[in-house]
Image: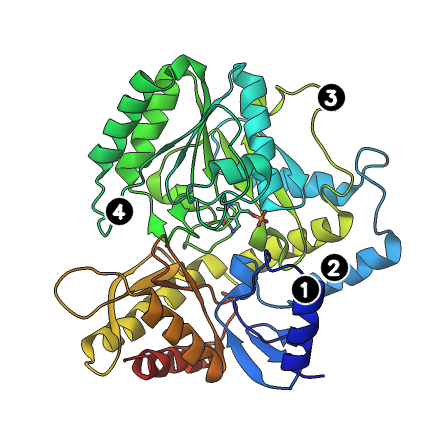
Amino acid sequence: MDNSSLQQRRQGAIPRGVSTAYPIFAARADNSELWDVEGKRYIDFAGGIAVLNTGHRHPKVMAAVARQLDAFTHTAFQVAPYEPYVELCERLNALAPFKGPAKSLLFTTGAEAVENAIKIARAHTGRTGVIAFAGGFHGRTALTMALTGKVAPYKRKFGISPAGIFHAPFPSDELGVSVADALKSLDFLFRADIEPSEVAAIIVEPVQGEGGFLPAPTELIAALRDLCDRHGMVLIADEVQTGFARTGKMFGIEHSGVEPDLITVAKSLAGGFPLSGVIGRAEIMDAPEPGGLGGTYAGSPIACVAALAVLDVIAEEKLIDRANAIGARIKASLERARMRNDTVAIAAIRGPGAMIAFDVIAPGATWTPDADATKRVVNAALDDGLIVLSCGVHANTIRILNPLTISDELLDEGLDKLTRALVAAKA
Ligand code: PMP
């Protein structure tokens, strides 16, 4: 089997709407390494898009899944419930930054978690409106696509959004938007489009992921908390990408010290198995009527035992501390690259913990995004055996999402490959 014949079959059988970053096909993977069908080895700095904080096939996760496969694989939680679901929710309730009692429930994908957080907020408040941020990403289903703050490619050709969804600008130095600007826009929105008393929820990523790894300033999160308290709105932290040690805390919102009302989780929760959830303040979580929430596969027992193992691994291997150490090492390497003059121009090295990104810009004094050079970096890295992803509203951000279980040796090897790609991509 080779990549190019698979690519041809893929093009014949699968629509172009699901695009793939690279024309390589996976054969196997282990911790921070992946091999394609031609036997070429890659260091994985994508982690399946923020899913593999505990690496590919962590032995503890695999052992837990193997035990579960021998017991049962599916009953539907609504038919015959099982302990791993209950235990996982108990542990998520204890881990999440809520002072009072919390409850959780489980789904399969990040979009489903976000959809259900909105349903819960609407049931609790009896209101419809939802405010999200430009550049934010919350999923591709009809409702989450509407919440996602980027038209191309996510909304293009897919018709008008459901009513009641509004966007405010997200603060970013590079984009020239301050926290005051964002708050002024919210104030404007409340006067021009929807009264706060009609708004069920504000949803925000503690660090915008797909939007370019832009941390939400603490002043913004605190101001949103204040608005929600004053007007009875629910504050939802979308932690699908930021959760589970990635940012150097268990949840990204902890950096702000602000307590949200609901938290959506997915991705690294279950170390490579499809699982998502909503964690929230108990009195809000109990608003929907029995039967209003759930799903046939929601909270698969296989994924639940994987997630329980993931939580053990995060604690035992001190992955929160490790995220901070890895992030410092990545930033130091990028700073060294930034000081060289034989690479493409890079700027704005940023991000908490190991949620690190930087921008590729055109040479010169002003911040001009260079999406073509970004593509060249990503492709040069791939040629050299490093999988790394771009993101951002200008497609000029390179983000690093390596497993937190990576060794220093492999991390350095990957960072050397990244530096070589920055050199190779210089026009
Ligand atoms: N929210 C955020 C913050 C995300 O990053 C993503 C996925 N990139 C989603 C929601 C949607 O998750 P999924 O693709 O599993 O539906």
Foreground mark, 4 or 3, reads 4
**Count of labels in the image:** 4
Dividing the picture into quarters, in which one does residue 51 lie?
Answer: bottom right
**Distance of mark 1 from mark 2, alpha carbons?**
6 Å
**Residue at horizontal 39 percent and vertical 43 percent from the top:** 206
Label pair 1/2, CB-CB below 8 angstroms? yes
Q: Is residue 286 visible?
A: yes
Measured as percent of width and height from the top left, residue 98 is found at 48, 32
Q: Secondary structure at mark 4?
A: loop
Q: Quadrant of the C terminus?
A: bottom left
The residue that mark 1 highlights is: 60
Using the image, determine if residue 341 lies above or below residue 215. Answer: below
Residue 295, above or below 187: below
Q: Secondary structure at mark 1?
A: helix
Mark 4 or mark 1: which is in front? Answer: 4
Residue to which mark 4 is pinned: 172
The amino acid type found where label 1 is placed reads Lys
Amino acid type, label 3: Pro
